[in-house]
Image (cartoon, rainbow, N blue to C red):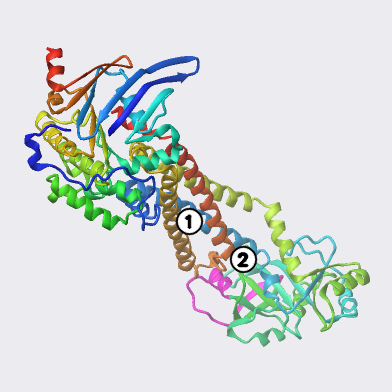
Amino acid sequence: MGKASAYDSKRVETGSGAFPHHLVRPRGYPYSANMWSIALKMLLGDKPKYFGLVFGVTFASLLMGQQVSVFISLMTRTAGLIFDLTEADIWVMDRRVRYIDEPEPIRDIELPVVRSVEGVEWAVPFYKGVATVRQPDGLSQVVILVGIDPVSLVGLANDTLQGDARVLLQPQTAMIDKNGYKFMWPGQDFVLGRELEVNDQRLVINAICNAAPTLTTYPTLYVSYTTITQLFPQTRNRLPFVVVKVAPGHRIDDVVRRIEQETGLQALPRIEFAWRSINYFATRTGIPINFGITVFLGVIIGAAITAQTFYLFVVENTKQFAAMKAFGVTNGQLFRLVMLQATFVGVVGYSLGMGLTALFIRSVGNVPAFRGLTLHWQVVAGAAVMITLIIAIAVSVSLIKVFRADPAMVFKG
Amino acid sequence: MTAISLEQVGKVYQSGEVSTVALEQVTLSIPMGELSMLVGPSGCGKTTLISIATGILTPTSGTVTTLGQSLASMTDTQRVLFRRQHIGFIFQQFNLLSTLTAAENAAMPLVAAGMPLAKAVIKANALLARLGLADHCHKLPKQLSGGQQQRVAIARSLVHDPALIVCDEPTASLDGKTGREVMDILRSVANHPQRAVLIVTHDNRVYSFADRIYDMADGKMVGEYTHETYLHKES
């Protein structure tokens, strides 16, 4: 028995000291759930590292969300005209055509042949080309010229902002897209009746519309196909595309096959043609590589910042983890503690990153260069997967340190 | 009832082809209700001994019985749970979590056992008050002096009412006056028939607090003394 001492007067009583005990946890308490509040206090208490971790994840999320969205927007723009022409089910073109900006003229005689194919409800010409227009002040400007069927007006942008779409029924009359107008006459109000010169022919702008953005920032001028023939009379074959509506009761694939059999031309369902155009730009240009490098660097830098900061956070707490092990915290509890910290950082950083991405997209909504920019759910989901991977890497590296923390090390001063 | 009983305990560290004998045929019996000290030069095996006695390390040979339980018969998880419930630790460097308050640090063993933090903190507050830290419960470790931090560590070691308190150089980082205050507390803690305090120390200023002193050298137990006989031997 211990000796009586002067210190008995302030003897520290901590309880009964009941003995022996059972090797079970206290009854009535959820196992380890309360370590969560400790985990968050550990994390949030070290503010520089917490903000560093959140910054890393936010940075990676923002770069992935923003850059991938811009990339998707650009790729979608390459097929903007195809997506806009919702009335048509099938596009008919020369067999050599690989995407919409590479039209090969077909003979005008092909149009009635296509119309005669079984299952075709209607088929109309559709022209898309590039032309140089001259303004009254002598300034030249490259424009995208879209020629549509003068009877049905199929292919015309649906959203007319000023004027009337039916003006295209008149010869040498054009409709211009809103952003093209702003591009050509920056800072000026919308005024109808402006004149342009194309191939020594006069063209009057009598309507303004809101059209799907295209890859380039060139203005889009809509004219009737008849006007196209007047603007370029010397060219015998001008027709690049015939767009087709499938009659009710017929399958698109069947009609596509019949058109190809009877005309020898290439026929593609609308969405397939759109994707073919997108794929062309995606596989044959440097756009995806450049965006891919940016996104890749974002992921790498984000992962490096997150993993390194998290690892340092764990390393600095190694002795504390070892002490916790010494007084009875299990590896399982420490695993859950570290996982909770990592998950918390991931959720906060990812939410901030996606929030900033959404804010960016919203703030540039009216900028012509960013028209059509949308945060797709696939981007949100993809970024979530990547952030989960980054967090998993950070946690894996750190957990090795936690699991290897030897409780005996705390006795070594 | 003995707190710790070691029978012919040996420990050999193997590193590649090199073997280092840390403990050799150590036999020791530490009774309940006493404050015992383990003394000896650095590297003599004191840390290895307390690590084995608390189930942190397993011996190469011999048997270990702590608080009546054979540690060899337990799984790793059972040993962790055993420590959680029955052993309190006090370290030289305190090892408090810097982002937790004094009360939260003291409450850690209870929280680890599953008690809600708020409830555990109430219990820790009461204990800290008894240790003279009533006004410091909400402070972070960096806002406390070394002595106050060590008292928080003492509270952490006692909060779950363990039967065995193991201290590793508890006064080494403290000045003489503060070290004596800490020893006063540990002396008081040991005055309980169902509790034992084992202190590993180099600090000869605190030997007078011991009921029993175990002297080690080169991995062997070389003597067992009262503090009077030990000081007589030293002189």
Image coordinates of residue A331 in percent, x first then y, are: 43, 42
Cα separation between marks 1 and 2: 29 Å
* Residue nearest the observer in this picture, B43 or B50: B50
Residue type marked 2: Tyr
Task: Name the chain under label 1.
Answer: A
Image coordinates of residue B234 in percent, x first then y, are: 15, 13
Asked if residue A154 lies left or right of residue B171, the reply is right
Residue B223, image quadrant? top left
Residue A405, above or below A83: above
Residue picked out by circle 1 = A62
State which region is magenta: A178-200
Residue picked out by circle 2 = A218
Image coordinates of residue A86 in percent, x first then y, are: 70, 77
Residue A192, image quadrant? bottom right
Can you see residue A198?
Answer: no
Residue A164, image quadrant? bottom right
Question: Is residue B177 rendered magenta in the image?
Answer: no
Query: Residue drawn at (27%, 53%), measured in percent from left and top?
Result: B120
Query: Residue drawn at (93%, 72%), measured in percent from left and top?
Result: A262
| Number of the label disc, if any, that sits on residue B219 | none
Quadrant of the snapshot with the N terminus of chain A: top left
**Sequence order check, earlier mark of 1 and 2:** 1
* Residue nearest the observer in this picture, A165 or B78: B78
Residue B57, above or below B13: below
Image coordinates of residue A55 in percent, x first then y, are: 40, 51
Residue type marked 1: Leu
Query: Residue drawn at (54%, 81%), measured in percent from left and top?
Result: A191
Q: Is mark 1 on a helix, strand or loop?
A: helix
Can you see residue A2?
Answer: yes
